[in-house]
Amino acid sequence: MSLRLEIDGAIARILIDRADKRNAFHLEMWQALPRLLDRAEAAPDIRLIMLQSATEGMFCAGADIGELLTQHKDLAWLAANQAAINTAQYRLARSPKPTIAFIDGDCVGGGCGLAIACDMRVATPRARLGITPAKLGLVYPLHDTKLLVDLVGPGQAKKMLFTGALLPADAALAIGLIEEIADSADALAAQIIANSAHSCREIKLFVRRILEGQAQDDDASLTIFAEAFAGADFAEGVAAFTSKRKPQFP
């Protein structure tokens, strides 16, 4: 399958394990990603999902071009592949749990799409990020293009898409394509895991609503805000604050 789930305490690591193909995704891998997300999201002890390579020095070269060249005249395969990519990206972008892409090496095309579908991206100094369909005469999916525009703005998104250039980590950080340059994403993950899972889940939902066009509170958002004051996490947070200790959220 070349894609697997490993549990590391409160972190579910989705490992891309196809080093001989620079972790390029084939159809079965796109189809497998939502199933792995389902498993991670259903586990109550999992607080965060991290997408990373099983092998150091790489992230993902994108879709498997060899497979595409073999199958591109098969209309049924093309439809299945497009549906699988769209489903995987949509589900990853809307996972209820916080997600981090840890990028160590090249993160290209569909691989960059996977990274921008995560909530945050941490890249090592040797990372390079780029989106290259214009070099192949292809078009990037609209959903993934929106994710890119939401991150870096329309001008930088067009520059990336029109040129297909690979950005080093410092350039990616400068335009907001990644959040941190670090040798590991574990420190960021630990900070998130230490906080309220309820807060992170609802805040993530609010951010998604804003990205999809909502600008004003509605009854649902006002209810979520108000009900938090009666929640167990707020009680623990207040108790920890007043006693000057770290909170222990369930």
Image: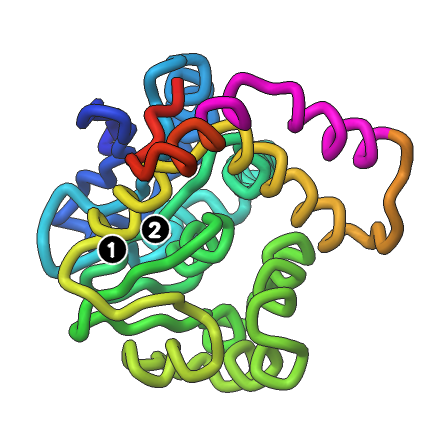
Give the number of marks: 2
Is residue 79 in view from this perspective?
A: no
Residue sitting farthest toward the front:
243
Q: Which quarter of the figure has residue 93?
A: top right
Task: Name the residue nearer the viewer: 39 or 9.
Answer: 9
Q: In which quarter of the image is the C terminus?
A: top left
Earlier along the polypeptide chain: callout 1 or callout 2? 1
Q: Is residue 100 above or below residue 97?
A: below
Q: Which quarter of the figure has residue 245?
A: top left
Q: Is residue 226 found inside the magenta-colored segment of the image?
A: yes
Is residue 16 in view from this perspective?
A: yes
Q: Is residue 34 found inside the magenta-colored segment of the image?
A: no
- Which secondary structure lies at badge 2? strand
Q: Is residue 62 above or below residue 82?
A: below
| Residue stretch in magenta | 220-236
Asked whether, in this view, residue 34 is left or right of residue 156, the answer is left
Q: Name the residue under label 2.
A: 101
Point 41% across, 60% down: residue: 112
For the residues labelled 1 and 2, the Cα–Cα distance comes to 9 Å
Number of the label disc, if any, that sits on residue 187: none
Q: Mark 1–mark 2 contact, CB under 8 Å?
A: yes
Point 37% across, 58% down: residue: 121
Q: Name the residue under label 1.
A: 59
